Image (cartoon, grey):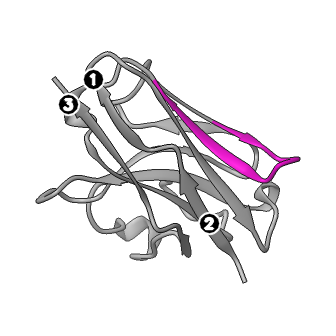
Amino acid sequence: QVQLVESGGGSVQAGGSLRLSCAASGYTYRSYCMGWFRQAPGKEREGVAAIDSDGIITYADSVKGRFTISKDSAKNTLYLQMNSLKPEDTAMYYCAADSRTYLRPLLWVGPPPPTRGGLTYNYWGQGTQVTVSS
C-alpha cells in the first residue's frame, strides 16, 4: 500500500520561505515520477514541480527560480523548498507519485491532458496548507 504524507506547511509573510516534505511508504522513489501540485480556493489544481525516475526536474513558470524540488532516496522523502513566497502561492499543496513513468507531461493545470490519456498521478497525499500574507 503506497502512502504519501506531506508536512511543513504553515503561514508566512511575503518574501519568506517554507520547506515541504513528503514521506513515502510502500515503494521507493527511485522507480516513480514524483510531483508537487497545489490548489487554491476557486482555482484549478496546478502542477508546481516534478522529478522523473531519471532525476530530470521540471518547474512551472510561476515558481521557476523560487522553488526547488529534491528527493532523499535513503529517507524516501520528497522536498519542496519554497523561497521568496508570494501571496499568490497560497494554496493546499499536494505530493503525488506515479508508477507509470512513461506518462508525459509531469505538470499541468486542471485536468490531466490528452497526452497522458487523461491519467493523473496514481498516488496522492492529503495535502498541507501554505498561506502567504502580504
Q: CA distance from mark 1 to mark 2?
A: 27 Å
Q: Which residue in the rendered view is the most extreme toward the bottom?
A: 1
State the SS at label 2: strand
The correct choice, above or below, for 68 with respect to 46 in the image is: above
Tell me which residue sits at (39%, 41%) in the image: 10
Disc nearest the viewer among 1 and 2: 1
User: Which one is earlier in the sequence, the residue at label 3 or at label 2?
Assistant: 2
Residue assigned mark 2: 4
Badge 1 local density, few (<14 within 10 Å), some, or many (20+)?
some
Instruction: Say which amino acid is labelled 1.
Output: Gln
Q: CA distance from mark 3 to mark 1?
A: 8 Å
Instruction: Say which amino acid is labelled 2.
Output: Leu
Q: Which picture quadrant has residue 34?
A: bottom right
Residue assigned mark 3: 87
User: Which one is earlier in the sequence, the residue at label 3 or at label 1?
Assistant: 1
Residue assigned mark 1: 13
